Amino acid sequence: MADEKYELLIEAQTKSKAKILGIPVKSFVEGQEYTQSFLLTNLGKEPYPGGKLFIKTGWASQQNVDSEYEIPEILPKESYRTLERVARVLSSGYGLIAVVDIGPEDAESVELFKNAEKPIFLEFNEAFHLVPGKAHEEIYEFWAMIIAAFSLLIIALEKIVEFVQWLLKVIP
Protein backbone atom coordinates (compact mmCIF):
# COMPACT_ATOMS: atom_id res chain seq x y z
CA MET A 1 0.00 0.00 0.00
CA ALA A 2 2.06 2.91 -1.26
CA ASP A 3 -0.56 5.56 -0.40
CA GLU A 4 -1.10 4.42 3.16
CA LYS A 5 -0.10 6.95 5.81
CA TYR A 6 0.87 5.91 9.31
CA GLU A 7 -0.15 8.44 11.95
CA LEU A 8 2.02 8.50 15.05
CA LEU A 9 1.80 10.72 18.11
CA ILE A 10 5.20 11.24 19.74
CA GLU A 11 5.76 12.46 23.29
CA ALA A 12 9.04 12.87 25.16
CA GLN A 13 9.63 12.24 28.83
CA THR A 14 12.75 13.74 30.37
CA LYS A 15 13.85 13.62 34.00
CA SER A 16 16.84 15.28 35.63
CA LYS A 17 19.44 13.19 37.45
CA ALA A 18 21.38 16.31 38.48
CA LYS A 19 22.85 16.73 41.95
CA ILE A 20 24.28 19.86 43.49
CA LEU A 21 26.36 19.41 46.63
CA GLY A 22 25.15 15.78 46.58
CA ILE A 23 21.49 16.82 46.76
CA PRO A 24 19.21 15.81 43.84
CA VAL A 25 17.59 18.76 42.05
CA LYS A 26 14.71 18.85 39.56
CA SER A 27 16.48 21.32 37.28
CA PHE A 28 18.45 20.19 34.24
CA VAL A 29 21.96 21.40 35.10
CA GLU A 30 24.75 21.95 32.60
CA GLY A 31 27.17 19.00 32.56
CA GLN A 32 24.80 16.79 34.57
CA GLU A 33 22.84 13.75 33.38
CA TYR A 34 19.16 13.36 32.60
CA THR A 35 17.06 10.51 31.25
CA GLN A 36 14.90 10.59 28.15
CA SER A 37 12.39 8.22 26.62
CA PHE A 38 9.72 8.57 23.96
CA LEU A 39 6.12 7.38 23.82
CA LEU A 40 4.76 6.62 20.35
CA THR A 41 1.02 6.10 19.90
CA ASN A 42 -0.50 4.81 16.68
CA LEU A 43 -3.38 7.19 15.86
CA GLY A 44 -4.13 5.53 12.51
CA LYS A 45 -6.32 2.61 11.48
CA GLU A 46 -3.44 0.45 10.17
CA PRO A 47 -0.73 -1.21 12.27
CA TYR A 48 2.54 0.72 12.15
CA PRO A 49 5.16 -1.81 10.90
CA GLY A 50 8.00 -0.51 13.06
CA GLY A 51 11.47 0.68 12.14
CA LYS A 52 14.10 3.03 13.46
CA LEU A 53 13.46 6.38 15.15
CA PHE A 54 16.21 8.99 14.83
CA ILE A 55 16.13 11.84 17.36
CA LYS A 56 18.30 14.96 17.46
CA THR A 57 18.77 17.16 20.52
CA GLY A 58 20.19 20.55 19.59
CA TRP A 59 21.71 22.75 22.29
CA ALA A 60 22.21 26.51 22.47
CA SER A 61 25.97 25.89 22.19
CA GLN A 62 25.37 24.60 18.63
CA GLN A 63 26.14 21.04 19.75
CA ASN A 64 23.83 18.24 18.64
CA VAL A 65 23.27 14.78 20.07
CA ASP A 66 21.84 12.09 17.80
CA SER A 67 19.98 9.09 19.22
CA GLU A 68 18.59 6.02 17.50
CA TYR A 69 15.75 3.83 18.81
CA GLU A 70 14.33 0.59 17.47
CA ILE A 71 10.52 0.72 17.26
CA PRO A 72 8.50 -2.51 17.03
CA GLU A 73 5.13 -2.90 15.34
CA ILE A 74 2.46 -0.75 16.99
CA LEU A 75 -1.17 -1.74 16.58
CA PRO A 76 -3.88 0.93 16.07
CA LYS A 77 -4.67 2.93 19.24
CA GLU A 78 -1.79 1.25 21.08
CA SER A 79 1.44 2.80 22.38
CA TYR A 80 5.09 1.90 22.75
CA ARG A 81 7.60 3.55 25.10
CA THR A 82 11.27 3.42 24.13
CA LEU A 83 13.88 2.38 26.62
CA GLU A 84 15.04 5.15 28.93
CA ARG A 85 18.47 6.47 27.98
CA VAL A 86 20.88 8.67 29.88
CA ALA A 87 22.03 11.88 28.20
CA ARG A 88 23.96 14.93 29.37
CA VAL A 89 22.95 18.60 29.42
CA LEU A 90 25.55 20.14 27.11
CA SER A 91 24.91 23.83 27.79
CA SER A 92 22.62 26.26 29.53
CA GLY A 93 19.66 27.34 27.46
CA TYR A 94 17.15 25.03 25.83
CA GLY A 95 17.89 21.65 24.32
CA LEU A 96 15.44 21.20 21.44
CA ILE A 97 14.37 17.61 20.77
CA ALA A 98 13.24 16.82 17.21
CA VAL A 99 12.55 13.76 15.06
CA VAL A 100 15.05 13.59 12.20
CA ASP A 101 13.75 10.41 10.57
CA ILE A 102 11.53 7.44 11.31
CA GLY A 103 11.11 4.04 9.66
CA PRO A 104 9.80 2.15 7.79
CA GLU A 105 12.14 2.73 4.84
CA ASP A 106 9.65 5.16 3.27
CA ALA A 107 9.58 7.90 5.94
CA GLU A 108 7.18 9.92 3.76
CA SER A 109 4.50 7.38 4.65
CA VAL A 110 4.63 8.52 8.31
CA GLU A 111 2.78 11.55 9.64
CA LEU A 112 3.91 12.68 13.07
CA PHE A 113 1.83 14.52 15.64
CA LYS A 114 2.61 16.16 18.99
CA ASN A 115 0.37 17.22 21.90
CA ALA A 116 -1.72 14.33 23.23
CA GLU A 117 -4.75 16.48 24.21
CA LYS A 118 -5.19 17.91 20.71
CA PRO A 119 -2.81 16.33 18.16
CA ILE A 120 -0.90 18.89 16.08
CA PHE A 121 0.94 17.95 12.88
CA LEU A 122 4.71 17.77 13.40
CA GLU A 123 7.27 18.33 10.63
CA PHE A 124 10.54 16.41 10.63
CA ASN A 125 13.31 18.39 12.37
CA GLU A 126 10.68 20.49 14.20
CA ALA A 127 11.23 20.62 17.96
CA PHE A 128 8.48 18.91 19.95
CA HIS A 129 10.07 18.95 23.41
CA LEU A 130 12.42 21.27 25.32
CA VAL A 131 15.05 20.46 27.91
CA PRO A 132 15.62 23.67 29.94
CA GLY A 133 19.35 23.54 30.71
CA LYS A 134 20.59 25.77 33.52
CA ALA A 135 24.09 26.79 34.54
CA HIS A 136 25.24 25.99 38.07
CA GLU A 137 25.26 29.71 38.81
CA GLU A 138 21.52 29.97 38.12
CA ILE A 139 20.80 27.31 40.75
CA TYR A 140 23.12 28.97 43.29
CA GLU A 141 21.57 32.40 42.61
CA PHE A 142 18.08 31.01 43.27
CA TRP A 143 19.06 29.56 46.65
CA ALA A 144 21.01 32.74 47.53
CA MET A 145 17.83 34.78 46.89
CA ILE A 146 15.78 32.43 49.10
CA ILE A 147 18.32 32.75 51.93
CA ALA A 148 18.50 36.55 51.49
CA ALA A 149 14.68 36.84 51.56
CA PHE A 150 14.51 34.72 54.72
CA SER A 151 17.25 36.82 56.34
CA LEU A 152 15.41 40.02 55.43
CA LEU A 153 12.25 38.62 57.01
CA ILE A 154 14.12 37.90 60.26
CA ILE A 155 15.57 41.44 60.32
CA ALA A 156 12.11 42.91 59.66
CA LEU A 157 10.60 40.86 62.51
CA GLU A 158 13.39 42.00 64.83
CA LYS A 159 12.71 45.66 63.97
CA ILE A 160 8.96 45.19 64.48
CA VAL A 161 9.59 43.65 67.92
CA GLU A 162 11.89 46.59 68.83
CA PHE A 163 9.23 49.06 67.67
CA VAL A 164 6.50 47.35 69.70
CA GLN A 165 8.75 47.35 72.79
CA TRP A 166 9.45 51.08 72.30
CA LEU A 167 5.70 51.77 71.89
CA LEU A 168 4.95 49.91 75.12
CA LYS A 169 7.53 52.07 76.96
CA VAL A 170 6.27 55.37 75.49
CA ILE A 171 2.55 54.77 75.93
CA PRO A 172 1.67 54.84 79.64
Image: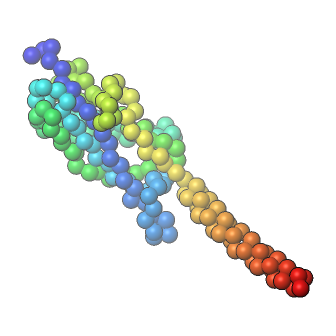
Q: Position of residue 5 (x, y in %)?
A: 18, 20
Residue at image coords 18%, 32%: 42
Work out whether 101 lies above or below 20: above
Q: Position of residue 94 (x, y in %)?
A: 48, 42
Please indicate, yes or no, whether residue 121 appears anywhere in the rendered image. yes
Q: Is residue 148 left or right of residue 26?
A: right
Q: Quadrant of residue 6?
A: top left
Residue 8 vs residue 164, the one in the foreground: 164
Residue at image coords 40%, 33%: 127
Q: Is residue 5 left or right of residue 142?
A: left
Residue at image coords 79%, 75%: 159
Work out whether 112 lies above or below 146: above
Q: Position of residue 69 (x, y in %)?
A: 23, 40
Q: Is residue 73 left or right of residue 108?
A: left
Residue 120 vs residue 110, the one in the foreground: 120
The residue furthest front is 172
Q: Quadrant of residue 144?
A: bottom right
Residue 55 vs residue 144, the one in the foreground: 144
Q: Position of residue 38 (x, y in %)?
A: 27, 43
Quadrant that contains the C terminus: bottom right
Residue at image coords 59%, 64%: 143
